[in-house]
Amino acid sequence: MLDPRTTTHDDLRSGTGPWRPGLQRPPGRPLERDMRCDVAIVGAGITGAFLAEHLSARGLEVVVIDREREGFGSTAASTAMLQWEIDLSLRDLAALYGFERAAEIYRLSFEAVGGLARLVGELALPCGFARRETVYLAAGEIGPRELIEEAALRERAGLPGQYLEHAALLSGFGFDRAGAIVSPGSAEADPLCLCHGLLAAAARRGARLVRDEVVAYDDAGRAAAVSLSGGATVEAAHLVLATGYVMPDCVSDDLHEMASSWAIATVPQPPQALWRGRALVWEASRDYCYSRTTPDGRIIFGGGETYSRRDPADIFAFVRRHLLKVYPALAGTRIDHAWGGTLAVTVNRLPFLRRVRPGIYAASGYSGQGVALAPFGGKIIAEAILGNPGRLDSFAALPCPRFPGGKLLRWPALVAGMSWYALRDRI
Ligand SMILES: Cc1cc2nc3c(=O)[nH]c(=O)nc-3n(C[C@H](O)[C@H](O)[C@H](O)COP(=O)(O)OP(=O)(O)OC[C@H]3O[C@@H](n4cnc5c(N)ncnc54)[C@H](O)[C@@H]3O)c2cc1C
C-alpha cells in the first residue's frame, strides 16, 4: 500500500524522460506564518497547476502546497498525449451510463482539450504544445466492426472524426492495419513545461507556492485548514486534494487501483521517418500501445497498463515487436530515454472528482489521462468552488464500478526496481 506520509516522487516514477523543466518555474517557498486564502490546493502536479491557473484567473486568492519539486511527481512521467478520447470507448461508456450521459462526458472532454489549446495560446506558454489528429487503430479484440460502430456513435454525439478502412489508412499514414478512426482536436505537450507554465501564470496573478508537507487536515470549523510540517497552518474556504496517487486516508476508497506503466523515447528521427501530421497513434486492444513524436523528432512509445512486465528484457521485446510492426523503418534506431511511473486507474476510466467533505474536494484517479483530463476535472471542481456544484454533483453521482476485491496495488516492483538503463539499446 502507498503510505501517503512516506511516498516520494522517487517512488512514483523512475528512469528519465525527455522533458525539460519550464524556464518560468516559480519555486515553492516555506511558509513562515499562518495564513488564510480562498482556495488551498495540495499538490503541484498538472492537476494542481491547472486548478491554480483557472481559479487565480477568476480572482481567487490561491495557495498551492507541495512537499517536493512542483511537477516532478507522476506528471513528469507522462507521455502527454492530450487526447479528448477517453480510455474507455464511447461505446463502452454508453453501455455503463446510457448514450446521452456518455456523449455529454465525451463532449466535455473534447471542449476541455480545445480550451487548453486556447489557454496555452493566450498565455503563450512555451511547452511544446501542438494540435494533433489521433489515429485509433484496430487491434486485438477491437476490429473494423467495433470501430465503425464507435465512429457512428461519435458522429451521433456530435464529435468529429472518420473511420478509415485498410487501404486508405495504409496510403494516408503507412499503417498496415485493418482500420482506424482518425479524429482532429487532440494535442501534445511537454507535461513538465506545461505544468510549470500554468503555475507561473497563477503566481503572476498572486497565487502563492508553498514548499512544505501537509501533515494534517482539519474540517471541523467553517473553513478547512491544513497543518504543514514546518509548523504553519493554511486556512482556506475551499481545499482541493490534488495529491495524485498519495490520497490522504480521508479519501481512501475502493474505486482506484494503482498500476504502473512505462515509455521509451528514441533518438531524434529525420522528418521522413515520421508519419503524416505526426498524429497521436494508439491501439484499441486491452494490452494496447501508443506513440507520439516530440518537437525534435523523437518517437515516444508506451504500453498500456502492462503491469505484468517487470523485466527490462520483456519490455524491450514488446517495444521491438510492436514498434517494428507499425514502423518497420525504425529497425536499428537507438532508444535514448526509458522510464516508468504510476497510474491510478478507475474501472470507468473517468477521474475521481468528489466533494469529500463540505469545502474539501478531491481530484485524482485520472487513469492514463491525467494531463489530458486535468482541464476537464479542474473545470468541474472550479465550478463547484465558484458556487455552481451541479456538474460535480451529477458527475459524482454516476455509479462507479468497483474493482473486484477492492483496492489493489500492482506497481512498485516495476517502478522502483527497474533497470531502465538496460533498455537504452538499438531497436
Ligand atoms: C508512463 C506514463 C505515461 C502517461 N501518459 C499519459 C498521457 O499520454 N496523457 C495523459 O494525459 N496522462 C498520462 N499519464 C498519466 C499522468 O501522468 C497522470 O495522470 C498525471 O500526471 C497526474 O497528475 P497529478 O497532478 O494528479 O499528480 P502528481 O503529478 O503526482 O502530483 C501530485 C503532487 O502532490 C504532492 N503531494 C502529495 N502528498 C502531499 C502532501 N501531503 N503535502 C504536500 N504535497 C503532497 C506530490 O509531491 C506531487 O508533486 C501517464 C502516466 C505514466 C506513468
Image (cartoon, rainbow, N blue to C red):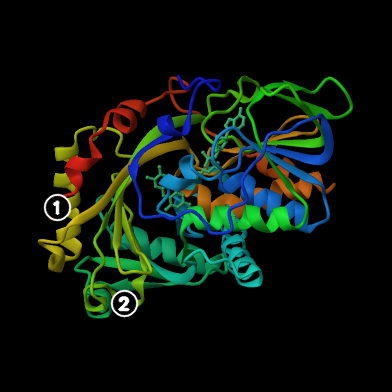
Residue 387: percent from left, percent from top: 85, 47
CA gap between label 2 and label 1 equals 22 Å
Residue 344: percent from left, percent from top: 47, 35
Viewer-side residue, 350 vs 383: 383
Image quadrant holding the N terminus, namely top left
Q: Which sits earlier in the primary sequence, circle 2 or circle 1?
A: 2
Q: Is residue 363 above or below residue 20?
A: above
Residue 349: percent from left, percent from top: 49, 43
Left or right, residue 327 beside residue 228 = left
Left or right, residue 132 beside residue 333 = right
Viewer-side residue, 274 vs 63: 63
Which secondary structure lies at badge 1? helix
Which secondary structure lies at badge 2? helix
Residue 101 visible here: no
Question: Disc 2 marks which amino acid?
Answer: Arg
Direction left: furthest residue: 332
Q: Give the residue pinned by disc 2.
A: 276
Q: Give the residue pinned by disc 1.
A: 321
Residue 42 numbered mark, or none:
none
Residue drawn at x 70%, y 54% is: 202
Residue 320: percent from left, percent from top: 15, 52
Question: Disc 1 marks which amino acid?
Answer: Arg
Viewer-side residue, 278 vs 149: 278
